[in-house]
Amino acid sequence: MNIAVKVLRKYTNTSLMLRIFIGLMIGAAMGLLLPQWNNIALFGKIFVSALKGIAPVLVAVLVMSSVAKAGTGYGRRFTLLISIYLLSTFIAAVCAVVGSFLFPVTLELGEAAQVESSAGSLREVFANLFTTMVTNPVSALAEANYIAILFWSIVVGIALRTAASKPTLDVVHDLSAVITKVVRWVIQFAPFGIMGLVFTTVRESGLSIFTTYGHLLLLLVGCMLANALVFNPLIALFLTKRNPYPLLLTCLKESGLQAFFTRSSAANIPINMALCKKLGLDEDFYSVSIPLGATINMDGAAVTITVFALAVAHTVGVEVSFVSALFLGIIATLGACGASGVAGGSLLLIPMACSFFGIPNDVAMQAVAIGFIVGVVQDSVETALNSSGDAFFTATAEQHDRMKRKLK
C-alpha cells in the first residue's frame, strides 16, 4: 500500500504538462506501430466521457455560486468581456473571408452526404437558440445544453442572491468547491486520456489527411492561427496598453494545448478556471466569464463556417462579392455563438451559411461530410483557439478594468 501511495504521489507531483507530453508521444508511437491494440483507445473515450459528464454540473454549480456571492461593480467588466468575445468572433469571420478570397479553395463534391442537419435559415438558428435557452434545466444538464445551463444558472444565482440565507449560500459555495475537486481528480488522468485520443487519431487517419485536404486545412488553420497570434493580441494591446504575448503564450500552453486534444471547450473549463486562479484573477469574475466564453466565444467556429461556405460557393460557381462575403461573416458570427446549442457544433451550421448564397442543402451537406473528415485537425485547432481565448480575454478584461481604476 505504501508503494502505491508513493507512486501516486510521485505521479501527481510531476508536472502535468510533462505527463501529457509523455502520454502524447506514447499514443502516437503506438498508433503507428501497434494499431491493433484497440484497448488503448478506451483510455481516451473514458477520459473525454468523464470530463463531458461532469462539465455540465460544474458549469451550473460554479455560475450559480458565483452570481449568488458576486460583489458589485462587475457589470461594466462583463459588458466589456461580451463585447470582446463578439468582436473577436467577427474578426475571425472577416479573416476567413479575406483568406478565402486570397486563397480560394474548391472541394470535391460527389453525391449528397447522408447527414441530418439541425441548422436551416438564420431565423431557425435563432429560434433554436432561444428555445433551447429556456428548456427544462434538468434536461439541459442531462443533454449538456450549455446555453440553457448558463441561462438557468444565472437566474437561480440571482434568486439565491436575493432570497437565500447565508447558510444556504455557504452550502452552494461548498458544493462548487466539491465539484471542482472532483474535476481536478479527473484531470490528473489526462495523460492516459490523451494517450488514447492520440492513438485513435494516428491509427485512423495517419498522415494522409494532410495530402487529400491539405489546401483546405492550411486555409482553416492559417485563419485560426492569424486570429490567435495576431488579431486577438491586438485587441488585448489596445485595451491594456501592454505586451499581450506573455499572457497569450501562457494561455496557449496551459489551456490551448489540452483543448487541442480533448476537443471540447466545455470539458476544458476546469483547465481555464485553474489557469485564471494561477494568473491571480478575480474568482467572482472568471467563474462566470469562463463558462460564458465556452458558450459564446467561438472564433474557430466562425472561421470554419465562413471558409466552408465560401469553398462550396467557389466549387459550384456561385459569384460572391466581397460585400456579400462580409455579410456572411456577420451571419457566421451570430451562428457561431449558438454553435454549442446545435448538435454537431460548427460543422452543421455550414448549410445555414450556404443558404445565404442560395446553395441547396444537399450540396452544402457534402461540405459537412468533408468537415467530419478534416475534423481530426480542424476541430482540434478550433477548440484550442476558442478555449485559450476564453482565459486570454478574461485576463484582458480584468487588466483593463484594473488600469481604469488606477487612472481614477
Image: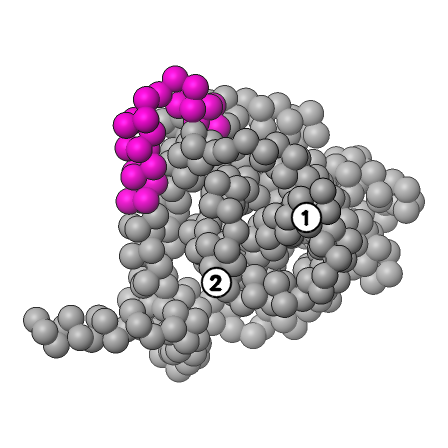
Closer mark to the observer between disc 2 and disc 1: 1
What secondary structure is marked by label 1? helix
- For residue 362, which quarter of the picture? top right
Q: Would you say the residues marked 2 and 1 are in contact, meaning their CB atoms lie under 8 Å apart?
A: no
| Type of amino acid under label 1 | Lys
Q: Residue furthest left?
A: 1
Q: Quadrant of the C terminus?
A: top right
Image position of 398 (left or right of 145): right
The x, y position of residue 312, in whole percent, is: 76, 49
- For residue 141, which quarter of the picture? top left
- Residue under circle 1? 406
- Residue under circle 2? 258
The x, y position of residue 123, in whole percent, is: 69, 25
Image position of 25 (left or right of 403): left
Q: Is residue 16 visible in the rendered structure shown here?
A: yes
Magenta span:
154-178
Q: Is residue 16 above or below residue 341?
A: below
